[in-house]
Image (cartoon, rainbow, N blue to C red):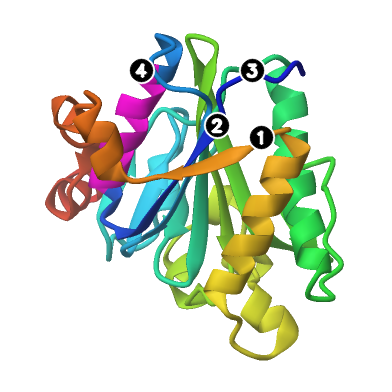
Amino acid sequence: RKRRAAMEYLLDLGFMQYGRAWAIMRAIHEARVNDVVPDTLIVVIHDHVYTTGRKGNASNLLKPILPLYWVERGGDITYHGPGQLVYYPIIKLRMPVGSFVTLLEEAVINALSNYGIEAKHNPSHRGVWVGDRKICSIGVAVMGGVSLHGLALNVNTDLRYFTYINPCGLDSSKITSMQMELGREVDVEDVKGKLTLSIASLLDMKLKAVTLNDLINSGLNPEKYGEPARLSVDRYERTSS
């Protein structure tokens, strides 16, 4: 695509509670729709949480041990938590959404190849796979021509949390991580560097690092979004009994 004069933004939120990061993502999305900010790549590591897409099936939450948020992305229930890298590309799309998702998958595949992990696309299920096990989930939405939500790569993720759900409608045994594939813990910051470069390359982004304070000082207001809809454990138990 034709490059704009302005650089795209890279916003690394570090470790952040899911609801807060969601509000920041929504605020940046609104700003991008209105051309207040350029395309922005957000990277974050979340606390322990389950999220499900707009058409998710609540029965795929087998045991409600964590908060469950209903959000506007595609896809079904998944887990986020420490040891997992999450990317939210807030991009004004100039391609079909299916092609965009394929590029995100390709970026992950390329990054994993640096570690000797042979990953692949799966024509039946979106995301990135190693053999018959899923190592990266992808769920995006497009509103106002701009993408939001994105991908979650299991690096050193505690896979036990997937056993309490049917992740993306799958059996939890179908989930893997870099740590599981390599038999050792992996440097998350190293993976972050390689995956960020891979995404930037495939999406033709020239990234400039910005901070949340930079964006707030320029008028970004995440507070207006509050938190996404949450299904409480109490409510789940009442409606499931």
- Classify 110 as above or below 140: below
Residue 30 tag number:
4
Amino acid type, mark 2: Glu
Tell me if 146 is positioned left or right of 2 in this view: left
Q: Quadrant of residue 36?
A: top left
- Name the kind of residue labelled 4 in the image: Glu
- If you read the primary sequence from the N terminus, does the residue marked by circle 4 or circle 2 appear first? 2
Q: Which residue is mark 1?
A: 205
Q: Main secondary structure of the magenta part?
A: helix
Please name the residue shown 74% across and 45% down the image. 105
| As drawn, 230 above or below 163 | above
10 Å neighbourhood of mark 4: few (<14), some, or many (≥20)?
some
Do the residues under discs 2 and 3 have CB atoms within 8 angstroms? no
Earlier-in-chain disc, 1 versus 3: 3
Do residues under tags 1 and 3 come within 8 Å of each other at their CB atoms? Answer: no
Q: Residue 67 appears at what percent x and percent y?
A: 25, 55
> Which stretch is magenta?
19-31
Work out whether 88 lies above or below 156.
Answer: above
Q: Earlier in the sequence, mark 3 or mark 4?
A: 3
Q: Residue at x 57, y 79 (%)?
A: 187
Q: Between marks 2 and 3, how big is the CA–CA gap?
A: 9 Å
Q: Which numbered disc covers residue 4?
A: 3
Q: Quadrant of the N terminus?
A: top right
Q: Nearer the viewer, residue 62 or 176?
A: 176
